[in-house]
Every structure is written in structure tokens, then in C-alpha cells.
Image (tube, grey):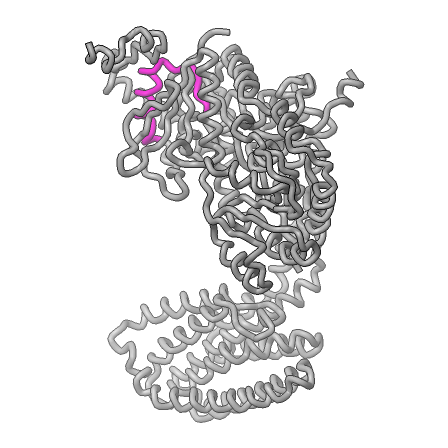
Amino acid sequence: MERLAIAMISDFFHPGVGGVENHIYMLSTELIRRGHKVIVITHGHKPDRVGIRWLLPSLKVYYIPFIPIASSATLPNFFTSLPYLRTILLREHIQLIHAHASLSSIGHEGILHSHLMGIRTVFTDHSLFGFEDAASILTNKLLVATLKNVDAVICVSHTGRENTVLRGQLFEKDRDDPTKLSVRRNIYVIPNAIVAEQFKPRPSEPSETITIVVLSRLAYRKGIDLLVATAPRICAAFPNVRFVVGGDGPKLVDLLQMREKHLLQDRIELLGAVRHSDVLSVLSRGTIFMNTSLTESFGIAILEAACAGLYVVSTRVGGVPEILPQDMISFAEPEVDDVFRAISEAITIVAAGKHDPMMAHERVKTFYDWQQVAKRTETVYNAVIQSRQIELMERIERTMDLGPFAGPIYTIILLVDCVFFLVLEWFYPREDLDYVEHHWDDHVLAQIQPVSASRHE
Amino acid sequence: MKTSEAEWERVLWKAQGFEDNHIHPQYFLESLRKNPNFKPYTYWSLVFLTCAITQHVSSIFIFLGIFLRLREGSLNPRGLLWSAIGAFCVGYGCWTFLSSARTSNNRKAAVEKRKILTLKSSVLVFLALMSLSPVLRTLTAATSSDSIWALSAILFSLNILLADYSVMPANEHGQERLFSVLSVNAAVSSSVVLASRLSTDAAVFALVLCSVVAFACFPLLRRLIQGTLVAWVALTVVLSLFAVALAAYISDTFTYLCASTLVIVTFVAPGVLMWAQKFKNEIRGPWDVAVPIVD
């Protein structure tokens, strides 16, 4: 296929750490390997992560000077990002932008602006949201407006897709029967992946004790209450079981209190925050991985644990049931009794030696792979590039469909954005832009003699 | 076609030979549930629950009526003082009777102890108010009356909005929630600023005592009465009629305002809520944050 120039836009990127950040980096790397040109646009980080940076291998990152408000997300500005994005997208000859994460307003703005320059849009949703609380209602409203005019949507799990379809109202009139609504055809499911080589099981000496590993942010949404309630029961029922808990967060106090109350200091080890590079060493201390999340879009931590050869016990929430075959994972309802039952079963399975870590690793290796993800994403890009660009009039009509209040508001935003763009075209003409002529080229780099070598002569 | 549709599984770990945008018509959104906890309200049960609000609003109207009559001098402060003390004693008697009926025998001693404490603190409040009333009378002398009306209106609205209309105390220790504490504070502050418009110390004292009885003590009693149907309805009727009767002494406009507010709150608002229920559209599915069951 032809070589594309792609811009990944998200508030969440390196130096931030997390699932979305990692996803964008891995996907960009694989796309570069497949011959595309990829840049990343994100917001700057104080004090010095600003301007243009390069990441290995030849990934160019633009840090726009916006200030994040909370957990690295910026405020929805709608217009202020247009001058930056216009310059960057034009000078890099971008053909397609790929926005990530529904809480990243810079991504939404990218989708809003890019049609002005004839650039196509793809959006990836990484998380699940409810419909009840005020925060969800507000972000869903923003999301609906953005997704009305996006060319394709990618979700990371089937549950995530159902959620995004409902949140973004991604329905359109049926082609055969215009009275019925059907789901839009441009919503794809492409899972995350892991680098299996980074999670090779380390051989351990056989021992009587069974170690249960928990690696998670210690927050309510991760179901730490369930852990606090079940851990003492498991310790009482199985004298040969130990716990290793990695992670930090507001629920750490509850864990500490539980440990103190039941005198389990020698059986429950709390590690505090664990760096991503140390995850494997923590995982390889145990044989069972326990995940008590109350909501999970994909559950990459579960996958990493399974890949490292651990037997997984998880609550049956969100997209977790989709990611592994039934015989590699035990499910529990989010209830103390059921979690206890599932853990007991897992301990029996592991104690009987029915779970082979090496085999589990080999199997997971075949399931998920970033190359496959990049290939499937490329198919989406192709379909988008070949599809028809939505005209401005159609955009306005679609936006007006949003509702009696939201519709006119977003239409005004859309139109003001067009006017602002025209002002920019006049004030800062395209001819005056500083276009990028050369991109990173490994061959050129290889031909140049290293400076140190020439100095020695 | 039929067989290939049947082969599709809702998993991510294996390649299934379908396009990534394939949507299985049967499995897609199969676990979506709409309005799973939907319980249609019945009109009279809503009216019964709304009585708490009616009582609260009537007590505010009664308080305003008392204030207006004190201000124009047609109500004797001494009489009001004695009736407030009388109302407090009757209410306290009811409260003791009803709460002793609920508490078990082994907590009797604690209840006895609390009774003495309550008596002590009520005497303290009484004396403190008495000594403070000259200060309260001149507290806002420099402020214009218009500001006072606006301020007290805002504070009373806050009081109505934040008041705790629930049946039982928030927890077993009988502690109040933050909102109901704010609500009581708003009402008492409002009556303090209103009292500063009165001319005699005795009137100020009587009015503030009234407000303590009506806004701090009465809500505690109200919760206990809600258990018995007849007393609950009777209390609502008596309070509303008293509020309207008191308003009738003052002016026609105030009477209409009072009566129509009470009727709307008690009878129209539940109807509106029932009508609005048909717009309820609650979406539930596997993406919701699960509620952990921890015993």
C-alpha cells in the first residue's frame, strides 16, 4: 500500500506513563517499520519537555505549549489549538490524523480542525465510561459531537465498542430501510497487544508456598475492597499462600489496616509503586495473578501476567472475558464469596501442577502481536483514505442532529472554526510556512562516518 | 452465511477471519439492559413522602407569619415565648416516647444519660439566646431592610434545598449529614437576620427561640413520626392549616402564596414526577463499574 503520513494526537504520551501512552508509542513504531511516516502531537510537560523531540526509532514528537489541568488532560479549548495544529499538519504534509483516548481534548480538537485541511480522521477509544455520573455525561456530550464527523473509530474490545457506540450515538439510517437505525460500518475492534519477549517466564525452583501477585493502582475502581476482604480469608484457609501486592494509591491505607488487624505482616508483602521495567521481576515471584478490577476496557495487566506464565484470576467485568481463552483464566463475580471460590480453585489447579508457565507463554505469544495490530490499523487507514470525505454541508447537518441545544452550539463552533481557519490562511499564508523537506532516513545515517571515528584519524 | 455467523465468538485472542468492523447482529449489545431498576411510583405513596417537604415548608411559612405579626406588633412576645417553650416540651415528650419505643432495653442507660445532657444543653441554649438577644437586635442596624429580605430569602431557599427529608437518621449514632447541618445553619442565620429587624429584646428572643424549635428540633421529631401513618398525615394537615390561617391574618397575597405553594408541593409535584418518569432511560451493561459485594 502507499506510504501515509500519519499524526497521532493525544494528551497522553511520553513522558506520561500508562496504557494509552504505550499503545501510541508501540503502534507508531510498528507503522514506521511498515514504511509510514508517523509523528505524535501532544501537550508540553513542565519544565523542559517542550518543542520538538525525537524518540527512537525516528518518531518525531511535537509538544504543544498547553497546560494540563488534571491527570495530564488539557481543557477543551476548541479553537486555541488550531494555529498550532494547522502549522504542524501542513508542514509535515499529514494525510491522516489518529486521535487517542476520549478524555484527551487535544485529540478531539484535532478531529474538529483537520477537515479544513482535507485531512482524514481516525479515533481510538481506550476506556469504558458509564452513563450516570456528571463527569461521564459531560465527556460523553463532547464525544458525541466529535464522533459525528470522524471517518473511523477503533475500539480495543467488543465491550468497548458497544460502549462507544452508545456513548457516541454512532448510528445512521439503514441503507436498505431508511426508517431503521443501524450501527455505522466504520467502527472497528482492534485489541491492544504486548511485547511477549518482555514477559518471558523465569524458571523458579519448585516450592510448597504459592504466591499470589496483585499489581494495580490501589484505587476503588480496581476493586481493592474485594482484595482487602478476601485476602485474610485466603490466608486463613491456605497456610501455604503468600501475597505480593505492587502499586500505590488511596486504598493503600485499607490494605495496611487489614494486614495489621489480621497479623499478616509476614504473609502479605506491600511493594509500593512498581516501575514498568520491574513488572516482570515482580510477576515472576508468583504463580497466580489476581485482578479485582470493577471496570476494565481491555486489561493489559492481565495479559502481561498470563504471558509471564501466571495463572490469572479476575473479576468478570468489561472486556476482560474476551482477552484470554477459558482455560487460562478463572472468573469470579465481584463478590467476596465468589472471589474466594475462584482463588481456591486456582490454588488447587496450580498446586496440582496443571498449569505450565512456559506453555502459557507460548500460547499468549501467538494471540497478540503489535505487528498484527499495526497491519489491522493500516487496513482501517486504507479504508478511510479511500472513502469519501464528508462535505461541510453534511458536517453541519450531522452536527445539527445532535439535539435542540447541543446541535446549534456545536454548529456555531464548527462555523467559527472555519472562519478562524480562513483568518489564519490570510494572516499566515501557506507559502510562508516552514515545510519539512527531509524526514529521518536510516540509510543516510548509516553512510555518515561517526564523528568520533573521524576524530581519531 | 448462516454457518459463518454462528462461528463468530466474542473474543479477541484468536483471529476469526472476520473483518474488524464486523458486527454480529445477534451478539451485538445483547447484554444491554434498559431501565433494569425501574419501579413505577404510585401517586399516594409519593404524596405520603412529599408530606415531609410540605411540613418543612409550612413551618417556614408559620415562622414568617409569626415574624410579620411580631413586626407589626400584633403578637405579644411573651405569649409567643411561652408557646415556643410549650411546643418544645410537647415535642420533647413525643420524641422521648417515640425513641424509647425504638431502642432496646440494654441501651436504656445510655438514653437516660443523653436525656440529662439534652436538658442541660437546651437550658444553655436558652440562656445564651436570652443574653445575646440585645446584640442580635442591633446586629444589622446598619444594613438596609431590602438586603435583609433578600438575604433571608436566599438562606431559606438553601434551607429547603438542603434539608434532610429522609425517614431515618443517616447512621445508627444519630449523626447528621453535612447537608442537613448546613440546612439548619442557613435557617437559623436567616432567622437571626430577620430578628434584627424587630424592635424589642423580648421579641428578638422569642423569634430566635421559635426558629431553634422549628428548624433544629422539629426535623428530629419529624423523622420519628413518619413511621405512623395517621400521626404523619394529621401533623401535615395541622401544620399546613396553621400556616394558611396565620397567613390569612397578614394579607391576601401572602395567603394565596402560602396555600398555592403547599398545594403544588403536596399534590402537583408528585404528579409531575410520575409524568416525568416516562422519560427515564437508564442504560446498563458490562461496561458499568461493578458494585463489589463486601460483607
Above/below status of A365 relative to A243? above
Range shown magenta:
A79-98
A420 sits to left or right of B64: left
Q: Residue furthest right?
A: B3
| Residue at (54% x, 63% y) in the render | A260
Quarter of the image where one finds residue A161: top right
Residue B49 seen in the current view: yes
| Residue at (28% x, 82% y) in the render | B138
Q: x and y percent of residue B143 in the render?
A: 27, 73
Residue A82 among magenta residues: yes
Above/below status of B87 relative to A379? below
Residue B264 seen in the current view: no
Q: x and y percent of residue A432 in the render?
A: 23, 14
Q: x and y percent of residue A434 in the render?
A: 25, 15
A436 sits to left or right of A219: left
Number of numbered discs present?
0
Quarter of the image where one finds residue A128: top right
Above/below status of A186 relative to B273? above
Q: x and y percent of residue B256 in the render?
A: 52, 69
A237 sits to left or right of A142: right
Looking at the picture, tell me which residue is in the foreground, B47 or A49: A49
Residue A191 among magenta residues: no
Above/below status of B241 relative to A428? below
